[in-house]
Image (tube, grey):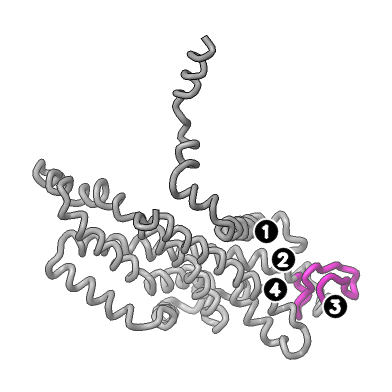
Amino acid sequence: MSSTNNSTAAQKPRTRFQRIWDSDVFFSFRRSPVTIVAALVTFILILAALLAPWIAPYDPFNPASLNLMDGFTPPNSESMMGNYFVLGSDHQGRDVLSTILYGSRISLFVGFLATLFAMAMGISLGLLAGYRGGTTDAIIMRIADIQLSFPAILIALLIFGIARGIIPPSKQEGMAVWVLIVAIGLANWAQFARTVRGATMVERQKDYVSAAKLIGVHPLRILVRHVLPNVMAPVLVIATIGLALAIIEEATLSFLGVGVPPTQPSLGTLIRIGQQFLFSGEWWILFFPAITLVLLALAVNLLGDWLRDALNPRLR
């Protein structure tokens, strides 16, 4: 009787969570301490940014709560007004820790949406070019080749400048974040398009696509329901690495003064403000936002490297 129970328990089907946890991807994740640390750092930074209104010690962007007498307070000390600042305060008396938490929200928001926009545009054009071929493929890929010959930051600067010239001055500050998202997205779609185009050209030669054409399935349905799922693995890798690049590009544009407005500072804006006081001794105003940006970009990049290796069938 006990042997029957044991065999029944042994044959009990695994749950979906167990199958996912025992997959090759998560097995490689559990075996990589660097990836685990990178995922933990990324999770902590994203969670802290999302919970900024509740965990930030002060509201750094409320003028009524600021006091210039709190300015230039060193880390782990009290100001002249008796307020305690863990990471110090800046020239306006704003808590550096609070500005980092709120600034990370904007950097992550711009990075995520810009990457999604670039991914959606690149996937659509890559599927179209790879499936149709011919003139359509030649036009899309030549545009991608031309764009890839220029640094992405220069293209983003050009697009941002054109948009600022079109938008009325009264609406520029309110739309600056969205203009930044579009500019970064348009500067990074080509990598997605080239990757998806190559994978689509391989998939369209397979029997399941030929069978779908034979029974009269609409080409759009073939692309969305059949081809797209089979080309998503490399896209996810590019998106992960692209997220880190988008965050850095946003910080670069904000550092140059053409990013988000000063009323909504991101990590790049905080770094630009901090570098003005670096040589006067107030090093913490620059150091802590810069370290946060480096940790975020490095952690996301390491996750992208792991995902690239985990989804590569040759390395399994």
Q: Is residue 144 left or right of residue 89?
A: left
* Furthest residue toward front: 3
Mark 2 or 1, nearer chain start = 1
Q: Which mark is drawn over residue 77?
A: none
- CB within 8 Å, label 4 to label 1: no
What whole-number distance in Å separates the C-alpha atoms at marks 3 and 1?
24 Å
**Picture quarter containing residue 308?**
bottom left
**Picture quarter containing residue 2?**
top right
At x 23%, y 52%, the residue is 223
Most frequent secondary structure within the magenta stretch? loop
What amino acid type should be assigned to the residue bearing mark 1? Ala
Q: Which mark is drawn over residue 69?
A: 3
* Residue 30 x, y percent position in the rendering: 54, 50
In this orientation, which residue lies closer to the viewer: 157 or 239? Answer: 239
What whole-number distance in Å separates the C-alpha atoms at marks 4 and 1?
16 Å
What amino acid type should be assigned to the residue bearing mark 3? Met
Crowding at mark 4 (Cα within 10 Å: few <14, some 14-19, many 20+): many
What whole-number distance in Å separates the C-alpha atoms at marks 4 and 3?
21 Å
* Furthest residue toward left: 214
Name the residue that disc number 2 marks.
Answer: 98
Name the residue that disc number 4 marks.
Answer: 288
Q: Is residue 288 above or below residue 226?
A: below
Mark 4 or 3, nearer chain start = 3
Q: Is residue 78 left or right of residue 292?
A: right
At x 66%, y 55%, the residue is 51
Q: Is residue 80 magenta?
A: yes
* Region of the chain picked out in magenta, as a range: 74-95
Q: Nearer the viewer, mark 4 or mark 1?
A: 4
What whole-number distance in Å separates the C-alpha atoms at marks 2 and 1?
8 Å
- Quick one: SS at disc 2? helix
What amino acid type should be assigned to the residue bearing mark 4? Phe
- Quick one: SS at disc 4? helix
